[in-house]
Image: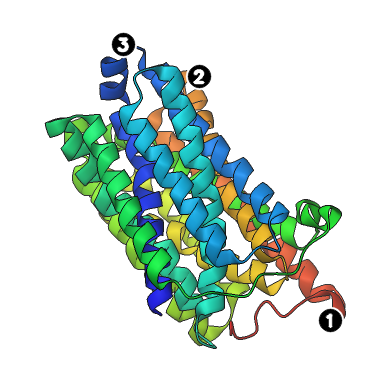
Amino acid sequence: MRGIRLLMTGAFTLGLDAYVMAGLLPVVAADLGTTVALAGQMVTVFTLAYAVSAPLVAGLLSGVRPRALIIAALAVFTLGNALTAVSPSVALLLGSRAVAGAGAGVYSALATAAASALAPEGRQGRALALVMGGMSAGTVLGVPLGVLIAGQAGWRATMWLVTGLGLVALAGLALRLPGTPAGPQVPVRERFGALTDRRVAPVVGASFLAAVASLGLYTYLAPVLGAAGGVAEDATAPYLWAWGLGGVLGSVLAGPLLDRTGRAVALAGALLAGLVLAEGALPLLGAAAFPALVLWGAVGWAFQVPQQQRLLGLGGGTVALALNNSALYLGSAAGSALGGLALAGGLPAERLPWVAAAVAALGLALHLLTAARARRAPARETPAEDCPAG
């Protein structure tokens, strides 16, 4: 499992970089003499580059050995962060974030597929959970540290931290990552067939809706807690930690559970139901929302483990995994944008979790409908999604 742990180190750096920038927007804007709104576009640029690059590169380079691509993608990601750290203007800042996002998107999809390929028989779920756990740990542990460093030494110091972590992960992968066989060369038509595959598309759609509900709502956790429980903005840190620690636990524990039961579809449905319950309870609990936040973080992050296993079981390969990763980032961006519009339109902040819970319920309905249709389909058309993960 050594190679999988190296992949997890890279995923930790991705998780840190993807979320820490949101906390640095005011200081970045002040340093570059621009508005927070314009500085915030660096998050949008990163997200879009991530979403577009993952399926595109994974498809076009499907015949290349994954080890070389993983190292190259992490190198591009690290270079983008170094350019961010020295950017003297908004234009160069946005360009550097696009470079970092492109590298992150490709690395995330390839690392997930490589982790599954490197795992011993019957332990693919654990391998997927380790990579996902690396990303969630980067968010939970790294983001507060990055914001703290920015407060003491400036936002560029935080970006040098991310760059340094990327270099450490890059060196480890270059020296110790085992090789895995290249996938077959996929014709252009088949590369993008996952977009319209009636088995793959609903799975990716459920991932998108879950990200809208979970990651999108997370953006507005402070005003939600303030409105629902009277929690002051400078007192939200314990609540953020509760959500994040739940995320680490959920993403790590989901893998062994999946390997033990082999029921990816059932597990995914249960996790979506847990997300509906946690977000629906949030306004009712107010300042005592810690249990709901732990549950929300746990099921939100854990959900992607059975989703990834399902896509691999459907034969979607790296392209399908890349589409799923793109759906996560697009869902996060869409959820943040829609939440902002809802609040600007007059929706009370304490009701926003109920809107998110409704979106999660829609994802659950899509999931259940897809599962029911798969059970009715002929056996030759439905690879066994609920067979043992190995």
Mark 1 or mark 3, which is nearer the start of the sequence?
A: 3
Check disc 3: other Cα within 10 Å, few if <14, some if 14-19, many if 20+. Answer: few
Q: Nearer the viewer, residue 31 or 217?
A: 31
Check disc 2: other Cα within 10 Å, few if <14, some if 14-19, many if 20+. Answer: few
Q: Amino acid at mark 1?
A: Ala
Report if residue 366 is visible in the image: no
Measured as percent of width and height from the top left, residue 324 is found at 61, 55
Distance between mark 2 and mark 3 Cα atoms: 29 Å
Element assignment for label 2: loop
Query: Which residue in the structure is indicated by mark 2?
Result: 345
Element assignment for label 1: helix
Query: Which residue in the structure is indicated by mark 3?
Result: 33
| Whether label 2 touches label 1, CB < 8 Å | no
Query: Which residue in the structure is indicated by mark 1?
Result: 379
Query: In this rendering, would 345 be left or right of 282?
Result: right
Question: Quarter-wise, where is residue 59 in the image?
Answer: bottom right
Q: Amino acid at mark 2?
A: Gly
Measured as percent of width and height from the top left, residue 202 is found at 72, 56
Mark 3 or mark 2, which is nearer the start of the sequence?
A: 3
